[in-house]
Amino acid sequence: MEPCALEVNGEQPALVGKLSLDLLVEEVWHQGRVSSPANVTWIHDGRGWHRLYFDCGIVFWRRSPIGPVAYDMPELQSRVEIVDLGRAFGFAGRVITDIAVPAIFGGAEVALGFDSGASIRIRNVEDRTTYGCTG
């Protein structure tokens, strides 16, 4: 059984060969617990911000003139925090060498490779987005 074909909405930015100045994620907290570790991923390449997010197994790419900010959602008893993965895992200031968007079972994934040999995979399965780093 093969995974479903992947659908991408928006144009994947030309980030290969560019510096990743910032790599941030919006971490959603609900009633004091993390409900989505990487609801939206933000990449800054020196020319602008790129938002990466998922919905119903679809990969969405959008440009944004400004970066993310933390905010409260009292109606949902939730808060969005900004987490700096670039600094935490050494991706900030590294050149992006590869972007892979493989089809996976039950969702979608985007993997970024860096000139240090490290990589990050942002994966959405069953409407929950997580990340994993190697290297």
Image: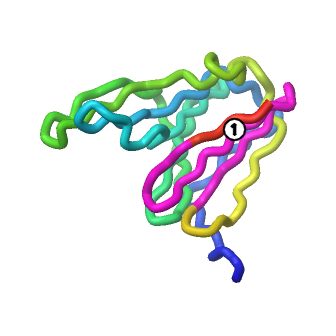
Residues rendered magenta in the picture: 108-130
- As rendered, which of 47 and 34 lies closer to the eye? 34
Quadrant in which residue 74 is drawn:
top left
Residue 126 lies, with reference to residue 13, above or below; the image says below
Rendering coords of residue 118 (x, y %): 80, 31
What residue did someone put label 1 on?
Answer: 120
At horizontal 18% and vertical 37% (from top left) the residue drawn is 77
Quadrant in which residue 78 is drawn:
top left
Q: How is the image coloured?
A: rainbow
Q: Relative to residue 76, is residue 118 drawn left or right?
A: right
Magenta segment, prevailing SS (helix, strand or loop): strand
Which quarter of the rendered picture does the N terminus lie within?
bottom right
Q: What amino acid does circle 1 point to?
A: Ile
Q: Secondary structure at mark 1?
A: strand
At horizontal 59% and vertical 60% (from top left) the residue drawn is 108
Residue 123 lies, with reference to residue 83, above or below; the image says below
Residue 120 lies, with reference to residue 123, above or below; the image says above
- As rendered, which of 16 and 130 lies closer to the eye? 130
Which quarter of the rendered picture does the C terminus lie within?
top right
Rendering coords of residue 98 (x, y %): 81, 43
Magenta-colored stretch includes residue 125: yes
Callout 1: few (<14), some (14-19), or many (20+) C-alpha neighbours within 10 Å?
some
Residue 87 lies, with reference to residue 123, above or below; the image says above
At horizontal 52% and vertical 63% (from top left) the residue drawn is 58
Quadrant in which residue 68 is drawn:
top left
